[in-house]
Amino acid sequence: MSKANTLFIGLDVHKETTDVALVAPMNRESGTYKGKRRIRGGRHRIRTVMFMAMMSAIQCNPVFKRHYQHLKAAGKLPKVALIACMRKLIVILNTMLKNEELWCAKNV
Protein backbone atom coordinates (compact mmCIF):
# COMPACT_ATOMS: atom_id res chain seq x y z
CA MET A 1 0.00 0.00 0.00
CA SER A 2 1.36 3.41 -0.89
CA LYS A 3 2.07 6.16 1.61
CA ALA A 4 -0.91 8.17 0.33
CA ASN A 5 -3.25 5.33 1.23
CA THR A 6 -1.93 5.03 4.79
CA LEU A 7 -2.06 8.71 5.79
CA PHE A 8 -5.22 8.16 7.85
CA ILE A 9 -3.32 6.09 10.42
CA GLY A 10 -2.07 8.20 13.30
CA LEU A 11 -4.67 10.97 13.21
CA ASP A 12 -5.70 12.14 16.67
CA VAL A 13 -9.45 12.26 16.20
CA HIS A 14 -11.39 9.03 15.55
CA LYS A 15 -13.96 10.79 13.37
CA GLU A 16 -11.23 12.18 11.11
CA THR A 17 -9.64 8.74 10.87
CA THR A 18 -12.81 7.00 9.77
CA ASP A 19 -13.79 9.86 7.47
CA VAL A 20 -10.47 9.71 5.63
CA ALA A 21 -10.66 5.92 5.31
CA LEU A 22 -14.30 6.44 4.28
CA VAL A 23 -15.97 3.82 6.41
CA ALA A 24 -18.20 6.44 8.01
CA PRO A 25 -21.70 6.48 6.49
CA MET A 26 -22.81 9.55 4.56
CA ASN A 27 -26.46 10.46 4.74
CA ARG A 28 -28.65 11.37 1.78
CA GLU A 29 -31.17 13.72 3.31
CA SER A 30 -32.83 16.81 1.92
CA GLY A 31 -35.78 18.49 3.58
CA THR A 32 -38.20 15.73 4.60
CA TYR A 33 -36.53 13.08 2.39
CA LYS A 34 -34.67 10.47 4.42
CA GLY A 35 -32.48 8.20 2.27
CA LYS A 36 -30.23 5.28 3.16
CA ARG A 37 -26.80 6.05 4.52
CA ARG A 38 -24.03 4.74 2.32
CA ILE A 39 -20.28 4.72 2.13
CA ARG A 40 -19.05 6.25 -1.10
CA GLY A 41 -16.13 8.03 -2.69
CA GLY A 42 -12.62 8.19 -1.38
CA ARG A 43 -10.02 5.49 -1.02
CA HIS A 44 -11.46 2.36 -2.55
CA ARG A 45 -8.29 0.30 -2.01
CA ILE A 46 -8.29 0.93 1.72
CA ARG A 47 -11.96 -0.03 2.00
CA THR A 48 -11.38 -3.21 -0.02
CA VAL A 49 -8.42 -4.29 2.11
CA MET A 50 -10.27 -3.46 5.35
CA PHE A 51 -13.37 -5.34 4.14
CA MET A 52 -11.39 -8.51 3.40
CA ALA A 53 -9.46 -8.24 6.67
CA MET A 54 -12.70 -7.89 8.60
CA MET A 55 -14.30 -10.84 6.79
CA SER A 56 -11.46 -12.95 8.19
CA ALA A 57 -11.48 -11.25 11.60
CA ILE A 58 -15.18 -11.87 12.30
CA GLN A 59 -14.51 -15.58 11.82
CA CYS A 60 -11.20 -15.90 13.67
CA ASN A 61 -10.72 -13.00 16.10
CA PRO A 62 -12.86 -13.37 19.26
CA VAL A 63 -13.04 -9.58 19.83
CA PHE A 64 -14.47 -8.77 16.42
CA LYS A 65 -16.54 -11.95 16.26
CA ARG A 66 -18.27 -11.01 19.51
CA HIS A 67 -18.83 -7.41 18.37
CA TYR A 68 -20.21 -8.53 14.98
CA GLN A 69 -22.59 -11.03 16.58
CA HIS A 70 -23.75 -8.42 19.09
CA LEU A 71 -24.58 -5.98 16.29
CA LYS A 72 -26.43 -8.63 14.29
CA ALA A 73 -28.39 -9.66 17.39
CA ALA A 74 -29.36 -6.00 17.80
CA GLY A 75 -30.99 -6.14 14.37
CA LYS A 76 -28.27 -4.63 12.18
CA LEU A 77 -27.91 -5.88 8.62
CA PRO A 78 -24.82 -8.08 8.10
CA LYS A 79 -23.05 -5.54 5.89
CA VAL A 80 -23.83 -2.68 8.30
CA ALA A 81 -22.41 -4.74 11.17
CA LEU A 82 -19.32 -5.53 9.11
CA ILE A 83 -18.71 -1.85 8.33
CA ALA A 84 -19.12 -0.99 12.02
CA CYS A 85 -16.47 -3.60 12.82
CA MET A 86 -14.19 -2.09 10.16
CA ARG A 87 -14.56 1.29 11.83
CA LYS A 88 -13.76 -0.27 15.20
CA LEU A 89 -10.62 -1.87 13.73
CA ILE A 90 -9.43 1.47 12.33
CA VAL A 91 -9.97 3.19 15.69
CA ILE A 92 -8.11 0.39 17.51
CA LEU A 93 -5.18 0.49 15.04
CA ASN A 94 -5.00 4.26 15.31
CA THR A 95 -4.94 4.12 19.10
CA MET A 96 -2.29 1.38 19.08
CA LEU A 97 -0.02 3.48 16.86
CA LYS A 98 -0.58 6.64 18.86
CA ASN A 99 0.23 4.90 22.16
CA GLU A 100 2.94 2.67 20.62
CA GLU A 101 1.26 -0.49 21.91
CA LEU A 102 0.95 -4.03 20.61
CA TRP A 103 -2.35 -5.87 20.13
CA CYS A 104 -3.79 -7.18 23.38
CA ALA A 105 -7.33 -8.56 23.30
CA LYS A 106 -7.81 -7.74 27.00
CA ASN A 107 -7.39 -4.00 26.35
CA VAL A 108 -9.91 -3.85 23.50
Image (spheres, helix red, strand yellow):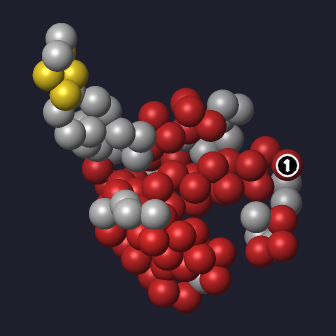
**Dot 1 crowding, Cα within 10 Å, few <14, some 14–19, many 20+:** few
Q: Position of residue 69 (x, y in %)?
A: 49, 75
Give the amino acid type for the residue marked by disc 1 in the picture. Answer: Asn
Give the image quarter of residue 88.
Answer: bottom right
User: From where the camera sits, is residue 78 visible?
Assistant: yes
Residue at coordinates 26% horizontally, 39% vertically from top-left? 37
| Image quarter hosting the C terminus | bottom right
Instruction: Name the residue carrying label 1.
Output: 99
Which residue ends up furthest to the top in the rendered image?
A: 31
Q: Write down the quadrant of residue 30 in the picture.
A: top left
Image quarter in which the N terminus is found: bottom left
At mark 1, the secondary structure is helix
Quadrant of the rendered image containing residue 42: top left
Asked if one can make out residue 54 in the rendered structure from this viewpoint, the answer is no
Q: Where is 97 relative to 12, above or below? A: below
Q: Position of residue 19 (x, y in %)?
A: 45, 34
104 above or below 88? below
Which residue lies at the image location 66% right of the left edge and 31% below the top edge?
13
**64 or 95: nearer the eye?**
64
Rendered location of residue 74, percent (x, y): 46, 63
